[in-house]
Amino acid sequence: MRIAVEEVHKLNREADETPGILRISLDAKARIKVGPFSRGGYSRQHKDGIDHDFDPDVVLGLFGFLLPEHDDTHFYFTKSKITADFIVDAIESLWSELKQTRKIHTLVLNMDNGPENNSHRTQFIKRIVDFAYSNSLHVRLGYYPPYHSKYNPIERVWGRLENHWNGELLDSEEKVLGLASTMTWKGNTPTIEMVEGNYNTGAKLTKTEMQKYEQRISRHPKLGKYFVDINPLRA
């Protein structure tokens, strides 16, 4: 595990020092239960919160991106599940913004090996490969091994967000999105988007279909689970 972490750090240093390469840290936050529930902090509105959250009005998912070298954050909320398709749709949405103002030929994505975005999740690999090829973009996936997610920079953003709305009653969607939009990360506020539509789990490729995508990627010779290279420019 230590070797994998060191390799991620090496990948990140190279990305941060090389023009044309953009590093993005991404991950999902714990789902947010919307309702008049106590969050364990001092209430700024002097309202009493319910001390249990068994019946929330709605549960929101939140997937976030941090550009560590630029201190930019981007939050994507959903009432649906955060699936492989949701994650890549969010990446595509973010890329449509980034490419307008930056000259980038390579993306380095820092991630945890979660169930919906790990390097053997066939639907995720299909979607991220299709994304790279459709944009003629070199994409490098660098995963943190289990129990090392604390090194993923986006995790510190989630800690900052929790501190920001601690003591607030997150009793409406508007309240959640409004508070998230006023959080600051090193002086910058995040972009906020509510993603509509329903995402279903379970989409996957057959072994034959996946073999075709494996031929379009390269894996680290010893740490193939943690490092995947997708380079359509070499195809």
Image (cartoon, helix red, strand yellow):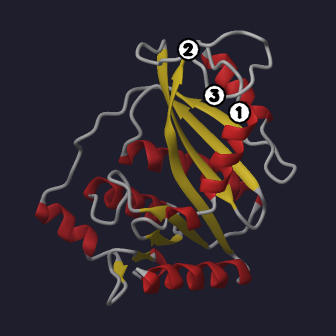
Q: Please state which of the two labelled residues, at mark 3 or mark 1, is closer to the viewer.
A: 3
Query: Sequence order check: which comes first, mark 2 or mark 3?
Result: 2
Query: Sequence order check: which comes first, mark 1 or mark 2?
Result: 2
Q: Residue at x 41, y 16 (%)?
A: 54
In the rendered structure, the answer to whether residue 178 lies left or right of residue 124 reads right
Q: Residue at x 32, y 59 (%)?
A: 126
Give the amino acid type for the residue marked by disc 1 in the picture.
Ala
Q: Please state which of the two labelled residues, at mark 1 or mark 2, is closer to the viewer.
A: 2
| Pointers 2 and 3 in contact (C-beta within 8 Å) | no
| Position in image of residue 102 (x %, y %) | 75, 63
Position of 235 relative to 110 (above/below):
below
Pick the front one: 186 or 132: 186
Give the amino acid type for the residue marked by disc 2 in the picture.
Gly
Pick the front one: 9 or 1: 1
What residue sits right under mark 1 in the picture? 180
Q: Residue at x 58, y 85 (%)?
A: 10
| Pointers 1 and 2 in contact (C-beta within 8 Å) | no
Q: Quadrant of residue 117?
A: bottom left
Element marked by disc 1: helix
Q: Could you classify mark 3 by the number of other residues whose Cα lies within 10 Å: few (under 14), some (14-19), or many (20 or more)?
A: few
Q: Could you classify mark 1 by the number of other residues whose Cα lies within 10 Å: few (under 14), some (14-19), or many (20 or more)?
A: some
User: How far apart are the two marked residues, 1 and 2, measured between alpha carbons?
Assistant: 16 Å
What residue sits right under mark 3 in the picture? 40
The numbered mark at residue 35 is 2
Query: Sequence order check: which comes first, mark 3 or mark 1?
Result: 3
Q: Residue at x 52, y 52 (%)?
A: 27
Element marked by disc 2: loop
The numbered mark at residue 135 is none
In the rendered structure, the answer to whether residue 104 lies left or right of residue 137 reads right
Position of 72 relative to 59 (above/below):
below
Give the amino acid type for the residue marked by disc 3 in the picture.
Gly
